[in-house]
Image (cartoon, rainbow, N blue to C red):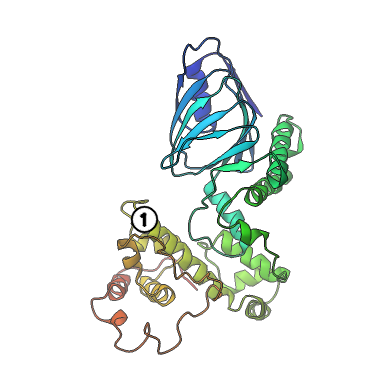
């Protein structure tokens, strides 16, 4: 664990910026005596901390870029994020901050001591996808406070406290390579079960029957790294069974083939990125950039698969921001990811339908594809 002590406000600001986020700190009233204590450690990709600043302060942050949870041991913390009213965190109610909002702490009380958890969005999203066994269609919108006075919230806060205390020991288990990943997973699982968010009820529902280990190994790999080059043979090697047996297992327990499932997950990731770019999240994004990023090497075939899955061209998604853009994602409960979405002869595939008319977005994508040499083979 890294330990920082200082009686200097600028040094404290710099220490918070190095371990957590860049901030501006202003004293409230006369500064008086000031002595900060900041202890931080890494648990996998997570950052945990125990912070005491010893003064009444106001703090300003930009967008955090991470999910962040504060569990207070003493004092109070008055805070707000863009578009939300001011809230006050106490030892009974912690706070959960989202990655994409400008953040303010209007009053860090002199007696405030808190445990902090900084979470990479990708790590949280991967963990939730593994628990749900499907792809997310956007960020996780947590309720901004978490009850740590009882039930699951209190259990999770105790787990946080244990992780921080154990991290103080250089020879303790949290610092061991064999323990870091399981402990990170436990902290994320606990938060997802204790905090309020749109997926909580689904997590609390009885789990479906377990899939066979070979199938689950492949599903875990696909969800973790859909952008990698995968073949039927390489997936079978991960499953530790033959290709034919893996395909039979997928048809029985997932309802589609491994390569079709992989293609569906990739398409869902593309759609999420395009929708985010359309809403202003990534200026200069192109369909080709996003398609290649997620493992599609032939834009024509990609555009056709995208239209079949979502009923519109990828360029249309990129040009038309709006709520619910991934509304037709194949990860809906009615259709297994990667399975067909339109029957032969449906409006999306009927001869002469507007989707295949010359000059349509799909035709433009296909024309561009002829000028691009595929560098990665999609299943």
In the figure, residue 209 lies in which quadrant?
bottom right
Q: Residue at x 52, y 52 (%)?
A: 140
Which of 301 and 19 lies nearest the eye of the viewer? Answer: 19
**Is residue 289 found left or right of 6 in the rendered image?**
left
Residue farthest along the right direction in this orientation: 172
Asked if residue 50 can be seen in this view, the reply is no
Where is residue 41? Give x, y as percent.
64, 33
Reading the image, the residue beneath label 1 is 277
Residue at the image position 46 percent from the left and 68 percent from the top: 267
One can see residue 100 in this view: yes
- Quadrant of the rendered image containing residue 198: bottom right
53 lies above or below 99: above
The one nearer the camera, 317 or 361, is 317
Residue at point 30%, 62% (across, down): 319
Q: Where is residue 163 in the image (x, y as percent from the top left)?
A: 71, 37
Is residue 119 found left or right of 346 in the rendered image?
right
> Which percent across, then down, holds residue 350?
35, 88
Query: In the image, residue 40 lies at what x, y percent?
Result: 62, 30
Quarter of the picture containing the N terminus is top right
């Amino acid at each position: 664990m890294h330990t920082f002590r200082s009686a200097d406000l600028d040094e404290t600001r710099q220490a918070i910026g190095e371990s957590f986020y860049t901030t501006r700190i202003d004293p409230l009233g006369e500064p008086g005596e000031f002595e900060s204590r900041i202890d931080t450690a890494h648990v996998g990709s997570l950052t945990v901390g125990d912070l005491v600043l010893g003064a009444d302060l106001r703090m300003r942050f930009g967008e955090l870029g991470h999910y962040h949870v504060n569990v207070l041991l003493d004092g109070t913390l008055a805070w707000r994020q863009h578009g939300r009213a001011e809230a006050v965190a106490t030892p009974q109610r912690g706070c959960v901050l989202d990655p994409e909002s400008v953040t303010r702490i209007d009053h860090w009380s002199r007696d405030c001591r808190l445990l902090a958890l900084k979470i990479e969005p990708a790590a949280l999203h991967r963990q939730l996808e593994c628990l749900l066994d499907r792809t997310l269609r956007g960020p996780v919108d947590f309720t901004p406070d978490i009850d740590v006075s009882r039930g699951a919230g209190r259990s999770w806060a105790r787990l946080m406290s244990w992780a921080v205390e154990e991290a103080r020991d250089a020879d303790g288990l949290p610092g061991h390579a064999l323990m870091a990943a399981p402990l990170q997973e436990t902290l994320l699982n606990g938060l997802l079960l204790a905090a309020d968010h749109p997926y909580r009820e689904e997590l609390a529902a009885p789990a479906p029957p377990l899939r066979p280990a070979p199938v689950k190994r492949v599903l875990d790999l696909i969800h973790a790294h859909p952008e990698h080059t995968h073949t039927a043979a390489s997936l079978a090697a991960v499953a530790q069974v033959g290709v034919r047996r893996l395909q039979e297992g997928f048809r029985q327990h997932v309802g589609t083939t491994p390569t079709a499932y992989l293609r569906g997950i990739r398409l869902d990731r593309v759609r999420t990125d395009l929708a985010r770019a359309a809403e202003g999240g990534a200026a200069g994004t192109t369909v080709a950039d996003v398609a290649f990023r997620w493992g599609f090497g032939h834009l024509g075939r990609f555009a056709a698969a995208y239209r079949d899955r979502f009923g519109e061209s990828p360029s249309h998604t990129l040009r038309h921001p709006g709520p619910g853009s991934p509304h037709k994602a194949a990860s809906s409960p009615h259709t297994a990811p990667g399975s067909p979405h339109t029957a032969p002869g449906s409006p999306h595939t009927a001869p002469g339908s507007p989707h295949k008319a010359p000059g349509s977005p799909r035709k433009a994508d296909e024309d561009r594809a002829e000028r691009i040499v595929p560098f990665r083979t999609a299943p």
